[in-house]
Image (spheres, rainbow, N blue to C red):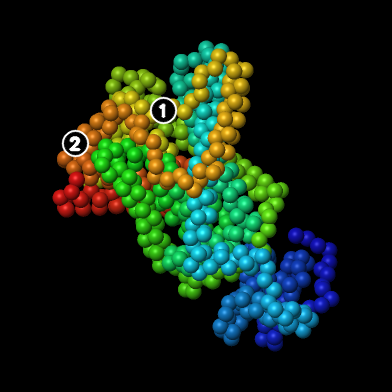
Amino acid sequence: MTTTSITQPSIIFKYDTIIEDEITQLSQAIENVPNLKANYWARWLAIQLLEGDNLLLLEVQAALGGQAVLQVLENSRTHLENHYGEESEIILAEHRYGFVNEVVGKVLIRPNGLLITNSDRIDKIVIHRWLGIPIFLVMMWVVFKVTTDVAAPFLNWVSAVINGPITHWVVALLNLVNLGGTWLENLAVDGIIAGVGGVLVFVPVLISLYLALALLEDSGYMARAAFVMDRLMNVLGLHGRSFLPMVIGFGCNVPAIYATRTLENPRDRLLTGLLVPFMSCGARLPVYILFASIFFPQNTGPVIFGLYLMGIVTAIGLGVLLKSTLFKEDEPMPLLMELTPYRWPNLKTIWFSVWGRTLAFIKNAWTIILATSIIIWFLMAIPIGGSGRFAHTNINDSAFGIIAGAIAPVFTPLGFGNQQTGGALITGLVAKEVVISTLAEVYNVTHGVKANKMPQPTSFIADIGEIITSFFTATIDTVKSVPLIVGINLFETEPSQNSPELMAAVKTSFEETSGGHGALAGLAFMVFVLLYTPCIVTIIAEWHEFGAKWTLFSVTGQIAVAWLMGTIVFQGGKLLGLG
């Protein structure tokens, strides 16, 4: 920032003598730094520094001679906080608001009765002591259903377009250059297209999430929600606003991580982001259904509900632990938020908010997941043993299989230490849905999961027509699903589509590795899937939002917690004679 002259205001608000003395000393120190003096009015900069403006603080640190200013700033803050018993930014704000209140009291003529606005009437219900939390939970339920069920038709449409027409076109192009049926086709379809699709398939979920968030924010309700949930979230050392990303996490952890952007405090964003992955996302549900159907056929529903509940309890316990250790605060910051009047959302603001957030996700995510998918494909394609060849080898004889076998002993205390489950958990890092297909492949059975692909059109025009037709079908299905939001049962699922062969193979394998305690081992497996790293896209989201260090801490912490809880379930169950 460079200016030729600094224009001072004609009217200057004066604080009391003690504050003014500190401002004067700090202003004099600023004027001794040429770069700061040339760019800022010294008094204004002094006040901003006392109020804790981090951007200006960084600029002062970088300026030649800025260390002298920082020393005076530290002394001034200490003096003011010792004298008034408050932080310096609060001290200055209280003096300004006190002056404003005094002036308003002298010039403003109020009506005899208290003026009650429509917003006040709504708030009597929305932030009511007893009704506030139920209303908030209903609103979050609606957001949750929008990001999971309402967006599902478009999610399926994107997946179908990628697995159908786009795959057809790529295969056709490779055939034109005589590369059809080669390992390059396998790489293009199973590596590159699957990798990009793994990102793009989340876009409808993200758009629906960002749309719901933008509507709540622009209408003025988000501030009320934070106020209502603040007391409960204080147990975790968080504000009420942190509860929203956790609710979204039940649908998908990826948009839940990005939803932490609604939190202004970096500490709150980080702590919330570390807890979100323990909310059981929808991608884990197929694994629960398969294993609960195998080992607990008479109690499938209660077992799945217990897993969801376990994720919540684990997040609360870890939140309390982190609050008292890494995220410890001497005095929790109070929630200060202006409750603006309710208003109709601005469509232009909504559009730019949704578009900007979605575009940021696509730009920052696709490269990493693409690279990861290709690496895993190569590991599964490289033969280490057996009679296979590159891209045509049994998974057990591939580099991937060797790695899976090497880590298998780690899971012995959980009751399922073999190559098959180790490999499934590795691929589960890419996406939890892959766990079932990996098990089916390593056990060499048909898993029976319905392929979400379009019919095979015969021409490019037919492909385009199918894309357009299916888009309108998805739109109609989305509109139809909106009235059913409240009436949909969270745990109501279709009958299992897994084949008896897969279920029998999994049961036999777990019985063998657990020494006859297959049900306990199956439960421990589900607990591990619940608590360990959700998927590679979630890791990307954490990396994007919180950086490499905290992402590594989060991933290793999730795996450690998952292993510990799975071990407790299996070993504890054996001691109690269960399973």
Question: Does the image show residue 475?
Answer: yes
Residue visible at 41% across and 28% down in the picture: 450
Is 176 left, or right, of 42 in this rendering? left
Q: Amino acid at mark 2?
A: Glu
Image quarter in which the C terminus is found: top left
SS assignment at label 2: helix
SS assignment at label 1: loop
Which residue in the structure is indicated by mark 2? 512
Whether 127 is drawn above or below 184: the answer is: below
Residue visible at 78% across and 60% down in the picture: 2
Q: Position of residue 424 (x, y in %)?
A: 34, 36
Say few, some or many: other residues with alpha carbon within 10 Å of mark 2 (under 14 / 14 to 19 / 20 or more).
some
Q: Position of residue 330 (x, y in %)?
A: 47, 73
Q: Quadrant of residue 107?
A: bottom right
Whether 33 is drawn above or below 403: the answer is: below
Return the mark for residue 450: 1
Q: Quadrant of residue 81?
A: bottom right
